[in-house]
Amino acid sequence: MPDQPNIVVILADDLGYGDLSCTGRDDLETPNLDSIANGGMMLTDFHSNGAVCSPTRASLLTGRYPHRAGIETALGKNEPGLPRDETTVAEILRNGGYSTAIYGKWHLGDRLENNPVHYGFDEFRGHTYGDSDYISHVDRHGDLDWWHNLEIENQEGYNTRLLTDYALRFITENRERPFFLYLSHSAIHFPWLTPNDPGHREVGRNYTSWRPDTPRALSKLGPHEDVGPVVRVMIEELDDSAGRVIKVLKDSGLEGNTLVFFLSDNGGYLHYGGLHGGEISSNAPLRGQKGDMYEGGHRVPAIAYWPGEIKPGVSRQTTLTMDLLPTLLELAGLEGPGRPVDGTSLLPLLRDGKPLPERTLFWGMRKKRGVRKGSWKLVKNDGQDCELYDLDGDIGEQLNLAQENPDIVRGMESALAGWEVDVAKNDRE
């Protein structure tokens, strides 16, 4: 294995489990991601740590359950962000000799003190809030949200393409030293727009509503009544971005010394508040969508690509976003943060196909909880009885086996109670 290989993490936003042609979607083509999947390892039981944006992003950077950082759901405007005393993978890599950059969506605090440059990134270009107009770069509150480090610096261009341009420049400029590139796309989050659309949002106007009686010109979802064709274009733009990244790595002679990891921050929307049903994402064959504790909320597409180091194939090992930090640090030969992490290094799996240690895994948002142990999946929705599924034969979570397996339910509930106490502890003192 080369010393301190380069690292590229490509994070899609709201991309569903079945949204790529290689994962089952037949109404669009994603040839670049299909090629990466064919040449790398497809992780078919990979999960985001959150069923919405911010928790997963916190776990990606810290290697810990997001609840330890107090981030359980998507952060709103001007809310406290990722605590500054959390140690991120970017900080450790930068201290270990890496150039670091994030291009795209941050969503771990839009206050200036929570800007990515305070968390180990040498350069940041993109938006700090949860969504941004792809053309005008205005957030849903009517504020311009397009940054270069600590300054607003708007630019003309379509979000996905601009972020990819930044990424290609960064790779080229740092080809003589190890680098960590975090390409954190906004796509395919609303407002749903294509490169041929005019900007939807204007500075000073409010776009926080989505109700059917909201004028379409002010909807946070975007201007289109029929969003299906728009989303398909956005997925294809995402695929084109991945292809451009791989091409520059090849052209620069870096492909054999670079781990590329592609994933999504949560499951896709099947509808939004009852609107656009069947027009947005595919999570097939899973149940549920973004925000749910069912598999469709957090089982996501994931691909690890590194020619010569990762043997092409498919892994059905259960893996999560929080596993990236220990994986990347082991890859770089660097020590972890001062406090314990919850993730497990995937390097033995990726390089040698070795099974991961058994573990019980947890998800939680507001009054929803999910627990995974082996093939068993426990779901607790507020005010409802526990549901239990055996994912080995029921990946779509259709057959509730809770009544037939009370001992398993009690054991998983007990583990969940212990986890909730554990993640509530203050380990920063």
Image (tube, rainbow, N blue to C red):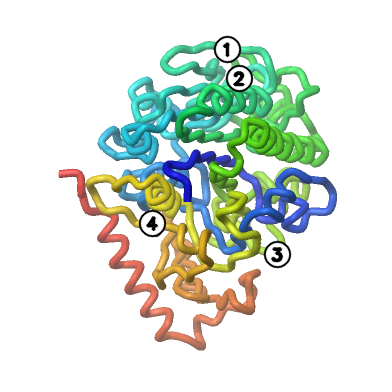
Q: Residue furthest left?
A: 429
Q: Earlier in the sequence, mark 4 or mark 3?
A: 3
Residue pointed to by mark 3? 285
Q: Nearer the viewer, mark 4 or mark 2?
A: 4
In the image, what residue type sits under mark 2?
Answer: His
Q: Residue at x 49, y 16 (%)?
A: 148
User: Crowdedness of circle 3 by 10 Å Cα count: few (<14), some, many (20+)?
Assistant: some
Q: Which residue is mark 4?
A: 343
Q: Where residue 344 appears, x then y in whole percent?
A: 39, 59
Q: Which sits in the foreground, 319 or 399? A: 319
Q: Which mark is residue 154?
A: 1
User: Camera-side residue: 178 or 190?
Assistant: 178
Chain-order first, disc 3 or disc 2: 2
Q: Position of residue 311 (x, y in %)?
A: 61, 60
Residue corresponding to mark 2: 137
Q: CA distance from mark 4 to mark 2?
A: 34 Å
Q: Are marks 3 and 2 in contact (CB under 8 Å)?
A: no
Disc 4 + disc 2, Cβ < 8 Å: no
Are circles 1 and 2 on residues that touch, CB within 8 Å? yes
Res. 221 in view: no
Density class for disc 4 (Cα within 10 Å; few <14, some 14-19, many ≥20) is many
Is 348 placed left or right of 40 in the picture? left
Judged by depth in the image, the label closer to the viewer, 1 or 2, is 1
